[in-house]
Image: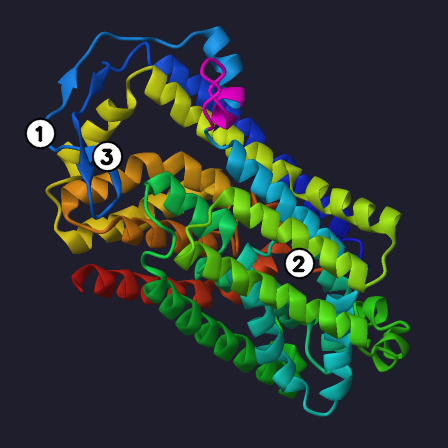
């Protein structure tokens, strides 16, 4: 390491220390919204059942002012709890979503304990030796599947130490290895189809089934993935032909010295066992069953949680983890997603304060006045850019969904735009921003492990961001016109 290089751990800490965490941002927003209930006039719309949406929606033109109910210190302190359930009536708010998140985390923890995913990657590397360029589309597709099905994000951090040495040994650079993981999983989240942390929570907050608009999201997923694969493959081919064209060419020798130590033996000894293959099959079948249950059997959070809980037990028994390792892995996996569960409650607490303070409809009325007259294309594209801006401050997909959808989704009713398009605009905006978001731990953490500085990452990815932005705008615009 040269004198002017910052140690990756310190770089990550320095960058992360400049930004508050999602918890702090959301709690500050709770306090801010409570303060606004003393300033913004209280008001309400009349509600009427909308058969297409399947719930009561605000009736345009019926807004009227009502007696204020400003929120005080006690209400702010109760808001995080009220985000999970009403402390007076005990009616559920986001408690079902939070519990589902914990069950899903436990399922992923048990799956990781089998070693099937890690071994599968190493085994694929061994079989593709001599045809390494095909590692890029194969692995990016797998990471994208993780992103679109369960919002693979923090889980990717474990793969950098495995993949970057393999990519370097194949003649590429560290940025290629980071891009395969970060862009691969990121474009999957951008094109979320059944991702419970983005699409499902957002659709729930918008009051629609998450399957609404799923065809358009598949188009986003497939088209975005093809664009990203082509971009990364083109860059990798160029770097292998001429290492001086790497955006981290000055660290070329240092990266090889650091990463290429003893990795060959691990790669050549990797082979999936029968148990690991069965575990991977069950892993995929679990998500397939979830899609079937939600789309045709009326399943929701409780039954989906039960599905993942049961699948975790089955995988643990088949893999012969033993009682202690099975339960320990499940608890560890749930612990890893505890922060996500808390974010869901905090974010819903903001909505609770707005509703109790009678200002949610006032904000909606203001937005209706300013945005309701926009043409449909202008409306949906403005929604996209609003979500882009909010994503920098609230990188959590679940937190942003619960925060923004209750306000933004009803606006679609006034603009004659489907609520599913607002959900799609939200998830694509959040996925796009989180490819570079410095407030997102997955970005700064992944770059630190891969020894790629933030400025070098921006130098690599900015053309791809422009391409994806145009692609997303075209797709959501076409969806609006259909």
Res. 156 mark: 2
In magenta, the rendered stretch is: 81-92
When the figure is inspected, residue 434 is found, relative to residue 466, above or below; the finding is above
Looking at the image, residue 414 sits to the left or right of residue 195; the answer is left
Give the image quarter of residue 337. Answer: top right
Gap in angstroms between the C-alphas marked 2 and 3: 40 Å
Secondary structure mainly formed by the magenta segment: loop
Q: Which residue is mark 3?
A: 56
Residue at the image position 32 percent from the left and 50 percent from the top:
384
Q: Which residue is mark 1?
A: 61
Looking at the picture, how far across and down is residue 66, in whole percent? 19, 11
Q: Nearer the N terminus, badge 2 or badge 3?
A: 3
Residue at the image position 50 percent from the left and 16 percent from the top:
87
Does 477 lie within the magenta span?
Answer: no
Looking at the picture, how far across and down is residue 124, in whole percent? 72, 81
- Helix, strand or loop at disc 2? helix
Looking at the picture, how far across and down is residue 262, in whole percent? 91, 73
């Amino acid at each position: 390491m040269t004198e002017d290089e910052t140690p990756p751990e310190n770089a990550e800490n320095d960058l992360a220390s400049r930004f508050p965490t999602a918890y702090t941002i959301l709690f500050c927003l709770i306090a801010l919204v409570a303060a606004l209930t003393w300033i913004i006039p209280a008001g309400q719309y009349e509600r009427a059942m909308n058969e297409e949406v399947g719930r009561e929606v605000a009736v345009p033109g019926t807004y009227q002012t009502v007696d204020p109910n400003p929120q005080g210190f006690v209400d702010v302190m109760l808001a995080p709890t009220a985000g999970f359930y009403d402390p007076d009536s005990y009616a559920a708010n986001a408690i079902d979503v939070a519990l589902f998140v914990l069950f899903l985390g436990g399922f992923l923890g048990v799956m990781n304990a089998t070693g099937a995913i890690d071994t599968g990657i190493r085994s694929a590397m061994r079989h593709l030796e001599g045809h390494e360029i095909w590692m890029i589309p194969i692995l990016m597709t797998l990471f994208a599947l993780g992103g679109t099905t369960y919002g693979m994000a923090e889980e990717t951090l474990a793969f950098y130490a495995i993949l970057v040495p393999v990519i370097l040994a194949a003649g590429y650079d560290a940025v290629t290895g980071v891009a395969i993981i970060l862009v691969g999983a990121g474009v999957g989240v951008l094109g979320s189809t059944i991702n419970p942390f983005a699409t499902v929570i957002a659709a729930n907050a918008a009051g629609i089934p998450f399957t609404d608009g799923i065809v358009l999201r598949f188009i986003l997923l497939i088209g975005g993935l093809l664009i990203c694969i082509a971009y990364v493959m083109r860059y990798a081919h160029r770097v292998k032909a001429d290492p001086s064209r790497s955006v981290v060419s000055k660290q070329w020798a240092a990266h090889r010295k650091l990463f290429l130590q003893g990795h060959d033996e691990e790669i050549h000894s990797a082979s999936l066992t029968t148990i690991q293959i069965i575990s991977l099959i069950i892993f995929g079948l679990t998500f397939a069953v979830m899609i079937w249950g939600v789309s045709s059997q009326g399943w929701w959070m409780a039954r989906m949680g039960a599905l993942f809980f049961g699948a975790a037990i089955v995988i643990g028994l088949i893999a012969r983890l033993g009682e202690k390792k099975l339960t320990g892995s499940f608890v560890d996996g749930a612990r890893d997603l505890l922060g996500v569960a808390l974010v869901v409650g905090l974010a819903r607490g903001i909505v609770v304060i707005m509703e109790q303070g009678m200002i949610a409809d006032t904000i909606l009325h203001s937005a209706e006045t300013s945005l309701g007259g926009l043409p449909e294309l202008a409306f949906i594209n403005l929604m996209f850019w609003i979500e882009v801006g909010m994503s920098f401050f609230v990188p959590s997909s679940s937190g942003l969904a619960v925060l923004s959808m209750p306000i933004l989704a009803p606006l679609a009713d006034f603009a004659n735009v489907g609520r599913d398009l607002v959900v799609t605009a939200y998830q694509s905006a959040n996925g796009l921003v989180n490819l570079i978001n410095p407030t997102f731990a997955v970005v700064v953490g992944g770059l630190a492990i891969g020894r790629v500085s933030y400025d070098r990452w921006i130098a690599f990815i900015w053309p791809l961001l422009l391409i994806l932005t145009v692609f997303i705008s075209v797709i959501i615009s076409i969806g609006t016109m259909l």
